[in-house]
Image (spheres, rainbow, N blue to C red):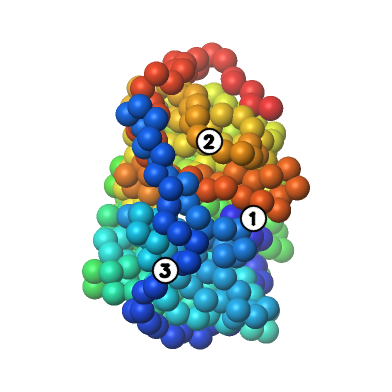
Amino acid sequence: MKEVTKVLFVISISIILLCACSSNERSLGNGISKKVTKGDIVYYKVPLSKNSYDDIVALSADNIIFFSYETNTIRNYYKYNILNDSLADLGKLDAELSNYNSTVIGDNLFFSIVKSIEGQALSKLYRVGLKKNTLKEIRSDKLYQAFVYAEAMSDSIYFLKGDVKGDIGITYIEEFDTLDNTFKRLAEQQYRRSSESGNGIRHISCYGGKIYAVVSEHNGGTRNYKICEYGKDGKINKAVDINSVKDIIGQEQIDDFRIMGNYFFIKNFSNRAAICEINGDKVNRIIDSEYKLDIATDSTNKDQDYYLFYQRESNNKPILLDVKNNSIIYLDLGLDNTYNKLRFILSDDKYNILVSYMSKDGKEEEKYYLNLLDFINGADKEEIDKEKVLHME
């Protein structure tokens, strides 16, 4: 579901956007979702066919927010209710690419798009009113790197942005308070290109009222990496050395990073990934994967007890990381799916997920809507062995 290439300081993404809003609702026309009951478990087969959409933005409160192309660049955005088959028109965007990040706060969904103008990125932040089916531009920025990564916590969204001033590359974290619509720069790192010295913020994540950033420290040709914990005042509370994952992030840009209690997930664009435990000032790798290990895409602003992982284009069972009980749960969803290759999984803040399976040739797709908590009882569980690395092939 991610189709955007990120670069530390300079990113060129071409998008043009034109907003038109509507509150009209109609049927998708494919019939309502089929309800399936197996004992105490209930799930739905979703009739949103592969040719009905081009990408999905978010899953929220039984709704799928997606878009489809009207022409090569004109996108129509919709909100589809899984349970009653209602389809609401949200608006049109004239776009070529967009960031995959989105977040739901209350009844609003936020996402950003970026347009490249003379080598610089013009980034626009939008808000979708999920109750009134509205689409509104919130802000526009002209930077070298903008809205590449976004994380939500409580009523705020935190963006990792970047700019270049002469020889200096600047990466910084900016807070958007959605209640009073104000923006504030919280933290900044600078890197001098000519001497290859200084620091850069590579990715961000939020958990437990704190903001976490992967920071690269440069001294000539030497690089070191750490996770810095920031308070909401922008000050660093503590940092932990993560040079033990240099094999993943040393030569590659970071595709995904997530703090999950005392654990973190990190992945590069070559699909090398790991799940690690933070134990004081030490980092222990507990899961290692060289094959498309992904975390379920979510738009929540809340901490979770369970985090869902899966391997794209495989028929391996998804796994849940139970951060409270330090265990791994192997999920046998037991759906009536014809196809076995996982395409994507989206989740919301109530452990509802939308899971897509595709055929071997990638032309056909089946989607299911279910709640993860219904599948935990009776599932195989394994306590995390901190002295052993689990390799997922």
- The alpha-carbon separation of the residues under discs 1 and 3 comes to 57 Å
Q: Residue 371: percent from the left, percent from the top?
A: 37, 39
Which mark is on residue 27?
Answer: 3
- The alpha-carbon separation of the residues under discs 3 and 2 comes to 25 Å
- Mark 1, residue position: 197
Circle 3 Cα neighbour tier, 10 Å, few/some/many (<14 / 14–19 / ≥20) = some
In this rendering, position of residue 180 left or right of residue 298: left
Q: Which residue is painted at 46% across and 67% down in the image?
A: 28
In this rendering, position of residue 205 left or right of residue 233: right
* Mark with earlier residue (3, 2): 3
Residue in the foreground of this view, choosing between 77 and 193: 77
- Mark 2, residue position: 336
* Mark with earlier residue (1, 3): 3
Q: Secondary structure at mark 2?
A: loop
Q: Which residue is painted at 53% across and 72% down in the image?
A: 113
Disc 2 vs disc 1: which is toward the camera? 2
